[in-house]
Image (tube, helix red, strand yellow):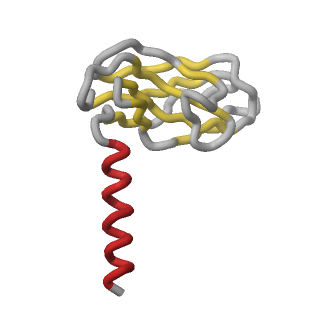
Amino acid sequence: MAFGLLMLSSSCKKEEDENKGLPTVVTGENCEVHQVSTLISGECTDQGDSPVTQKGMVWDTQNEPTLEKNYSFSNHGAGTGSFKSSITNLDRNTTYYFRAYATNTQGTAYGEVHSFKTLAK
């Protein structure tokens, strides 16, 4: 039993080490969903161990969008603060997943994934 507890403790430490120095980002709730557009928001609340060079939103029709795997993304520049992305040219009656991101020299951090469905008519 002690071995299992040791493994759990070690596993948690590894995750903390992976996020060390990354920015902190929060995904806002979406609003104003239309047939082919929406407005989504996020906030970079802490830049981590180095300045944030890029922040914004990433979205896709598949869950867990990233800068490497996405339908599209927005770039709202460097630093901390809140931002909004007006997204257009979306498919009607389609579910999209989105989240905020921020990048510094340590890597890219992502906020929680949220979703919305565009209107059919």
Relative image position of residue 4 (x, y in whole percent): 38, 79
Q: Quadrant of the C terminus?
A: top right
Q: Quadrant of residue 97?
A: top right
Q: Quadrant of residue 10?
A: bottom left
In the rendered image of this protein, does residue 19 appear above or below residue 33?
Answer: below
- Identify which residue is drawn at 36% across, 87% down: 1
In the rendered image of this protein, does residue 106 appear above or below residue 74?
Answer: below
Relative image position of residue 14 (x, y in whole percent): 36, 54
Q: Residue furthest top?
A: 77
- Identify which residue is drawn at 36% across, 80% down: 3
Relative image position of residue 69 (x, y in whole percent): 63, 32
Relative image position of residue 30 (x, y in whole percent): 49, 33
Q: Residue furthest bottom?
A: 1
Q: Is residue 13 left or right of residue 29?
A: left
Q: Nearer the viewer, residue 94 or 75?
A: 75
Q: Is residue 2 visible?
A: yes
- Identify which residue is drawn at 66% across, 27% down: 71
- Identify which residue is drawn at 43% across, 30% down: 101
Task: Count numbered badges in the picture.
Answer: 0
Q: Is residue 46 visible?
A: no
Q: Is residue 31 left or right of residue 20?
A: right
Q: Nearer the viewer, residue 107 or 117?
A: 107
Q: Residue furthest front?
A: 3
